[in-house]
Amino acid sequence: QVQLVESGGGLVQAGGSLRLSCAASGTIFRIIAMAWYRQDPGKQRDLVAAIPTSGVPNYADSVKGRFTISRDNAKNTVYLQMNGLKPEDTAVYSCYARVFYRGSSTDHWGQGTQVTVSS
């Protein structure tokens, strides 16, 4: 069993910043990749940023230059630093992790955290 617990969402004015955190715990041998997705009501969930264990992070075009994803492998935690927030960034942000254990990998999601950007 793997749990992802997110924190850091909230209400912020346009131009402001927020930092999201997501800590993974449970039966984990190795986390292959972690990522942040976001979803507006009635819309599909979109990738915001992803970071493999080693390698270059990738970002959605809409957040490049404003958001930074990072991870602390020792703590099994991923962060999303969001600067220059815009009203269109308003969404529920969910953490994702692909976990490797006993020869197989599984996908896991956090419960989501609301980010609201006011104009």
Image: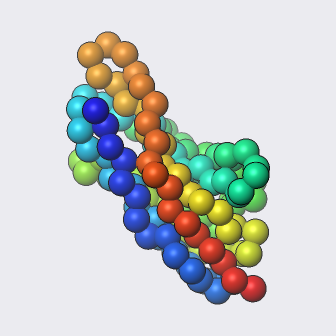
Residue 30, position as x, y percentages in the image: 30, 31
Q: Nearer the viewer, residue 40 or 119?
A: 40
Quarter holding the N terminus?
Answer: top left
Q: Which image quadrant for residue 119?
A: bottom right
43 vs 98, left or right, is: right
74 vs 108, left or right, is: left
Regarding residue 25, the answer to whether it shows in the image is yes
Regarding residue 69, the answer to whether it shows in the image is no
Q: Residue at x 37, y 16 (%)?
A: 104
Q: Residue at x 63, y 74 (%)?
A: 116
Q: Residue at x 57, y 80 (%)?
A: 11
Residue 52, position as x, y percentages in the image: 47, 38
Residue 28, position as x, y percentages in the image: 26, 32
Residue 39, placed above or below residue 88: above
Residue 15, placed above or below residue 31: below
Q: Quick one: which residue is furthest to the front in this view?
A: 42
Residue 33, placed above or below residue 80: above
Q: How is the image coloured?
A: rainbow
Q: Residue at x 72, y 75 (%)?
A: 86
Residue 51, position as x, y percentages in the image: 50, 44
Q: Which image quadrant for residue 6?
A: bottom left
77 vs 119, left or right, is: left
